[in-house]
Image: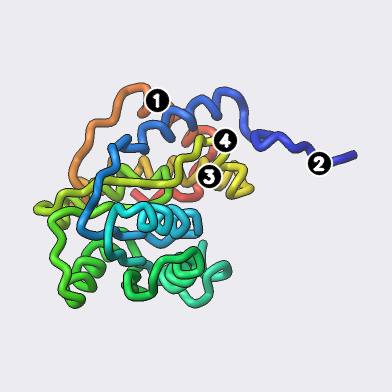
Amino acid sequence: MTEPTDIRRDVTDEQWANARLIWDYHLMGHELRPADAAIGLGSHDLGVATRTAELHRAGFFPVLVFTGGNSPTTAARFPRGEAVHYREHAIALGVPEAAVLLEPHAANTGQNIVHSRRVLAEAGVTPASVLLVSKPYMERRAYATVRKLWPGVDVRCASEALELDDYVTSIGDERLVLDMLVGDLQRVIEYPKLGFAIEQDVPDDVLAAYGGLVSAGFTSRLIAP
């Protein structure tokens, strides 16, 4: 018997509907406009580097920083560190080496922002506006982090223009993606209490979707209370 090809073979229709609500909430929907610099947030997803390169080639910013060391979910794929692999990928896609700054040590989103700001300053760049490029479902949390840690900068978010179905196909693991959607939403809710991010309104239907997926066991990316 052949393996089923449905990307949702381990996810019910109700769980998928909940995931779509959360996915849509995570997207900021910002209109792109030119910025003084970009920050590409490291992760397991090389699509972030691809999207950053596309936006640079389109003229949205003159300089960018790739930021990120390693984590348990990325060490095998990016053994030299997320930012290093991102930089190499962007250069291979045609971004000039001189336009790509490197921040290879950050271990969380707050460090991504603080360290990237320092790297830009050391390069003589003090941006009034920043384009933040991340995984699609990380847009809202990344935005909230910048607004907390760098409140004076004008920040807009960008990511690959993918629907949830397409993103799951690109990653190849639907349960992992749903776990990450849930984990990022928990951080959107909890991090303001810890001083890591600004508070944002979470609609009731999104909270209900979150509760449904947590109850269904999509919990591997949750932080301890």
Measure the alpha-carbon separation of dots 3 and 4: 10 Å
Q: Is residue 49 above or below residue 85?
A: above
Question: Circles 2 and 4: CB distance less than 8 Å?
Answer: no
Front one among 3 and 14: 3
**Residue to which mark 3 is pinned:** 177
Measure the alpha-carbon separation of dots 3 and 2: 20 Å
Q: Is residue 189 above or below residue 112?
A: above
Relative image position of residue 38 (x, y in whole percent) = 28, 58
Indicate which disc, 1 or 3, sits on the residue closer to the N terminus.
Answer: 3
Q: Is residue 70 visible?
A: no
Q: Nearer the viewer, mark 2 or mark 1?
A: 2
Relative image position of residue 217 (x, y in whole percent) = 54, 39
Kind of residue indicated by mark 3:
Val
**Residue to which mark 4 is pinned:** 165
Q: Is residue 182 visible?
A: yes
Q: Residue at x 28, y 30 (%)?
A: 202
Name the element at disc 1.
helix
Indicate which disc, 3 or 4, sits on the residue closer to the N terminus.
Answer: 4
Res. 14 mark: none
Q: Is residue 223 left or right of 32 when viewed as pictured?
A: right
